[in-house]
Amino acid sequence: MTVQVLRAEERPATPWLNGGGVTREVAGAPAGAGLGEFEWRVSLADVGEGGPFSRFEGVDRVITVVRGAGMALTVAGEEHRLAQPYRPFAFPGDVETDCRLLGGPVVDFNVMTRRGRAEAVVEIADFQRSVEVPEGAVVLVVCLSGTAELGAADLRLGEFDAVLLNSGEDLLRVDGVAAVVTLRRVG
């Protein structure tokens, strides 16, 4: 099994262009790709105030509230309340999207894939489970709260730490909540 550990304290915060928050990229492909070139990108964001989301042409998004009272997203004119943590919400990143915070700042987990080039499945784990990397995919495990351990790799993750798995299978033990993101190239 190939394991790449991605520690939270090593991620720089990048301010948003609109000043409403900061983003910390967890991982992306290809490595070092900018916002216009990525196939997939996973990040955590501190959202300090509501406002319009940046549009990403040809990109699908999955957003999950991790901390805070939640947000109401208006996507293409339809409102969706994300008031409970750890409930992934998928939407197209190339339509008009606006955010209204429901009770102060939030932290969200964001998965973006370039349509026709990559796909993602986001699962939330708050129990012990097997994590298998399917042929032609990678799996990113991000500890969203508490701790998580990968058995065979003998690896412990703290809050917002992550591990990128390129092959194999391992046992994930979670004392809190973790996101398990399976990413694969398409096309």
Image (cartoon, helix red, strand yellow):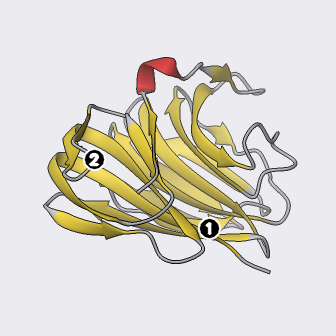
Q: Nearer the viewer, mark 2 or mark 1?
A: 2
Q: Is residue 42 visible?
A: yes
Amino acid at the residue labelled 2: Ala
Q: Position of residue 51 (x, y in %)?
A: 66, 38
Kindly report the distance in space between the C-alpha atoms of the residues bearing marks 2 and 1. Answer: 34 Å
Q: Residue 129, relative to residue 157: is it above or below? A: below
**Which quadrant of the structure image shows residue 127?**
bottom left
Q: Residue at x 23, y 68 (%)?
A: 130
Q: Position of residue 1 (x, y in %)?
A: 40, 57
Number of callouts: 2
Q: Which secondary structure lies at badge 2?
A: loop
Name the foreground residue: 139 vs 60: 139
**Which quadrant of the structure image shows residue 170?**
bottom left
Q: Residue at x 68, y 21 (%)?
A: 15
Q: Is residue 15 left or right of residue 33?
A: left
**Which quadrant of the structure image shows residue 112?**
bottom right
Mark 1 neighbour density, 10 Å: few (under 14) some (14–19) many (20 or more): some
Q: Residue at x 41, y 44 (%)?
A: 163
Name the residue at the bottom extreme.
187
Name the foreground residue: 16 vs 128: 128
Q: Earlier in the sequence, mark 2 or mark 1?
A: 1
Mark 2 neighbour density, 10 Å: few (under 14) some (14–19) many (20 or more): few
Q: Residue 113, relative to residue 159: is it above or below? A: below
Q: Which residue is mark 2?
A: 153
Q: Are marks 2 and 1 in contact (CB under 8 Å)?
A: no
Number of the label disc, if any, that sits on residue 91: 1
Q: Residue at x 52, y 26 (%)?
A: 48
Name the foreground residue: 134 vs 72: 134
Q: Which secondary structure lies at badge 1?
A: strand
Amino acid at the residue labelled 1: Phe
Q: Position of residue 50 (x, y in %)?
A: 58, 36
